[in-house]
Amino acid sequence: MLTFINLLKHITEKKYGQLSNKEITIPVKKLIQMKTQNNISELENGLLTSGDNLSYWFSSAVKPLAFEKLNQNVTTDILVIGGGIAGLTTAYCLAKEGRKVILVEDGFIASGETARTTAHISCVLDGHYFELEKMFDTPTAQLVANSHMAAIEWIAKTVKDDKIDCHFKRVDGYLFLDPSDSIETLEKELEATKRARLVSEMLNSVPSIVGLDDNRCLKFSDQAQFHILLYLKGLANSFIKLGGKIYTETKAENITTEGATANGYKIKSNHIVVATNAPINDWVKIHTKQWPYRTYVVAAKIPKGKLPYALWWDTGNQDSKWIAKPYHYVRLEVFDDQYDVLIAGGEDHRTGQADDENIKEEDRYKKLEKWTKKHFPDIGAIEFKWSGQVIEPIDSLAFIGKNPGEDNIYIITGHSGNGMTYGTIGGMIITDLITGKENPWIEIYSPSRITIKATGDYLHEVANMALQFGDWLTPEHIKEISDLKLGQGGIISSGLKKIAVYRDEQNNLHSYSAVCPHLGGILQWNADEKTFDCPMHGSRFTIEGKVINGPAVSDLKRIMDK
């Protein structure tokens, strides 16, 4: 039986032959239909997306953004690694400066976390502005606000100038209180955002949300939203018109100051930009300053006109055990002439540690659905669900700039819940660094910065990481391999070894070392996305042992297949 990706390859090669730098044009709806008809239970190897669930963006008739593979040695001025919003924005900006740029992506474009976003384009941050003032100072908070508003304007201008049809809309955003929080949070944030020169005001109720009529909220004007895959399609096309080259199914390895290797070929480059959400190399300095979280999303149709296009966020669960307080976030997206789609997210936890709250990954959707239907009762049945990986920096700000200790390797990571703006800011900053232009944001986002006031949270997260080594001593998740049902995975013990096992729908058994090749954490089975996740730094692996989330750079060691 053909696997999903092999089926995709077979059809595209039959239809197009050897691809040049143009995209594959099979609608994703057709791919989903093929997947169902062929009884394929997984999206193999993470080429289309980094998990078993398809996001709404992939499910709404958008075509996979796939290009030719690298098949020869190449030389370029700038190598960009990563085909999400950060990588494509960086490549586009540098190409506009007349530089020779090659972008490589190990899957398809947006197969990582970018297409698992909810695509809020906002200056409202996970880390409140009054907290930024305490962590840094008021001038820094002003620069942060300025950078995010500039990113919104940059996206708006690019959409207009390049005529990108991506449902881009200017919308208002509303920040309201979680039941565990107090009005003091909104009052402090109102004053801090005004000092940051943002357009904000206090309202006496939360627009369009049931059950919160008596609650105040902050309104933020000039926010935005779009369809992320349509936007990246337009950005990729514009990049290619500027002379750029994109190679998909091209995994960058052995990254050095000279370039990298990919698909067995050498890429020689003067500058290397790593824009892969979590840097894909053993750069421990960065991985000990940021932490991975899983976040969950549900989506349902709602009659058009029932709600305005807007962004909503609550202030987060103040009673949560996690440093990054989980919050809910909501928006609408165009569906058709009769319906919109309401997209709601939340129920976050540290990657690989869902069981610490006794709530499995797959059960998080039930909690999120209950919350969403309570506040937006006009929605229909939940039709889409997926999860994503969020990298939370220890001091609330992304890491954008030169990799510590390197002069020509640059990283963009730590996007927190603001990937659309941080990915854009990353492209702007890296372009200015490479072209030698001044930029007022370079210092505040420098990956080399040390934030003394974040020491307490840092020690808390380091302790959490250290505790994960205890998984070497904990009982196995399943007693016997024979206990595995079709489509089920888990961790078993064999003497002193920990083994990751998965039984596929054809009753074939796949077994790999359950030790993360990054720093030795014991992997956890994620039954929701059908992946093996590391609870230390968030590396994730498919049921075939292929790495789909860094910082690990190598696949799991195969033990046996039966």
Image (tube, rainbow, N blue to C red):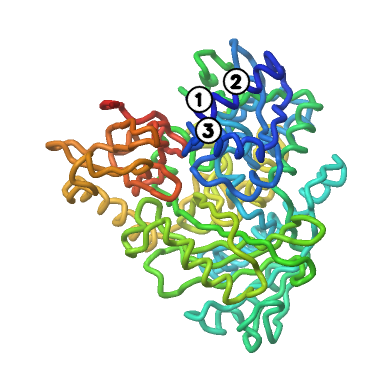
From mark 1 to mark 2, how far is it between C-alphas?
9 Å
Label 3: which secondary element: loop
Where is residue 112 drawn, in percent x and y?
A: 55, 40
In the picture, the disc for residue 38 is 3
From mark 2 to mark 3, how far is it between C-alphas?
14 Å
Q: Are marks 1 and 2 in contact (CB under 8 Å)?
A: yes
Whether residue 322 sits left or right of residue 81 in the image: it is left
State the quadrant of the C terminus.
top left
Q: Earlier in the sequence, mark 1 or mark 2?
A: 1
* Residue under numbered circle 1: 2
Amino acid type at mark 3: Asn
Between residues 180 and 102, which one lies in front from this camera angle? 180
Where is residue 90 drawn, in percent x and y?
A: 68, 37
Q: Residue furthest left?
A: 495
Q: Residue furthest front?
A: 37
Label 1: which secondary element: loop
From mark 1 to mark 3, how far is it between C-alphas?
8 Å
Q: Residue furthest top?
A: 72
Amino acid type at mark 2: His
Q: Earlier in the sequence, mark 1 or mark 3?
A: 1
Amino acid type at mark 1: Leu
Q: Are marks 2 and 3 in contact (CB under 8 Å)?
A: no
In the picture, the disc for residue 10 is 2
Whether residue 80 sits left or right of residue 459 in the image: it is right
